[in-house]
Amino acid sequence: MANSEKIDKLVESVVQERKREEIMREFKKGLKAKFTKEAEVNLLVNDALTIIENDKIELRGARNGFYKCTLRIAQSSTFTLLISLSIVLNTAILALDRHPIEP
C-alpha cells in the first residue's frame, strides 16, 4: 500500500502542476490582451491630443500673424538643418580650443 499511496501522491502532484501551468497560460493570455487593448487606447489618446494641439496652434496662428510667420519658420526643415549645423560647428570649434598645458 505504501507504493500505491506514493503513486497517488505523485499523480496528484503532476495533475496540480498541470493545472497551475494552464492557469498561468490563461493569465498570460489575459494580460497580453489587456495590454494590447491599453496600447491601442493610448495610441488613440495620443493621436487625439496631437490633433487638439495642432488645432490650438492653427487657431492661434489665425489670430496672430507674427506667431504664424515665426511658427512656419521654426517648423521648416531648412531652419532645423541650420540649427543642427550650427550646433555641430560650435562643437567642432570648441573642440579645437587648447589651453597651455603646464609641466
Image (spheres, grey):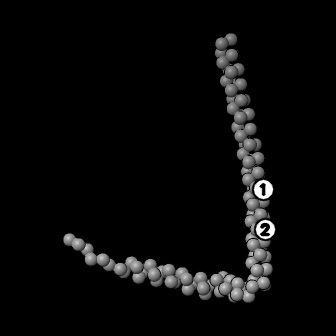
Query: Judging from the image, what secondary structure is the residue with disc 2 in?
Result: helix
Q: Is residue 1 left or right of residue 89?
A: right
Give the labeled residue for mark 2: 48
Relative image position of residue 10 (x, y in whole percent) = 67, 24
Outermost residue toward the top in this view? 1
Classify 13 as above or below 99: above
Identify the residue at horizontal 74%, vertical 65% (top origin): 46
Query: Mark 2 packing: few (<14 Cα in 10 Å), some, or many (20+)?
Result: few
Classify 46 as above or below 75: above
* Mark 2 or 1: the one toward you: 2
Label of residue 37 in the image: 1
Quadrant containing the C terminus is bottom left
Q: How many marks?
A: 2
Relative image position of residue 85 (x, y in whole percent) = 51, 84
Identify the residue at horizontal 76%, vertical 47% (top origin): 30
Identify the residue at horizontal 71%, vertical 40% (top origin): 24
**Residue 72 visible from this viewpoint:** no
Q: Is residue 71 left or right of residue 90?
A: right
Quadrant containing the N terminus is top right
Q: Nearer the viewer, residue 101 or 65?
A: 65
Task: Give the mark nearer the N terminus: 2 vs 1.
Answer: 1
**Residue 97 visible from this viewpoint:** yes
Relative image position of residue 84 (x, y in whole percent) = 54, 81
Q: CA distance from mark 2 to mark 1?
A: 17 Å
Residue kind at label 1, given as amino acid type: Lys
Residue kind at label 2, given as amino acid type: Ala
Query: Judging from the image, what secondary structure is the residue with disc 1 in?
Result: helix
Classify 28 as above or below 65: above
Relative image position of residue 97 (x, y in whole percent) = 35, 80
Identify the residue at horizontal 42%, vertical 80% (top origin): 92
Q: Nearer the viewer, residue 38 or 103?
A: 103
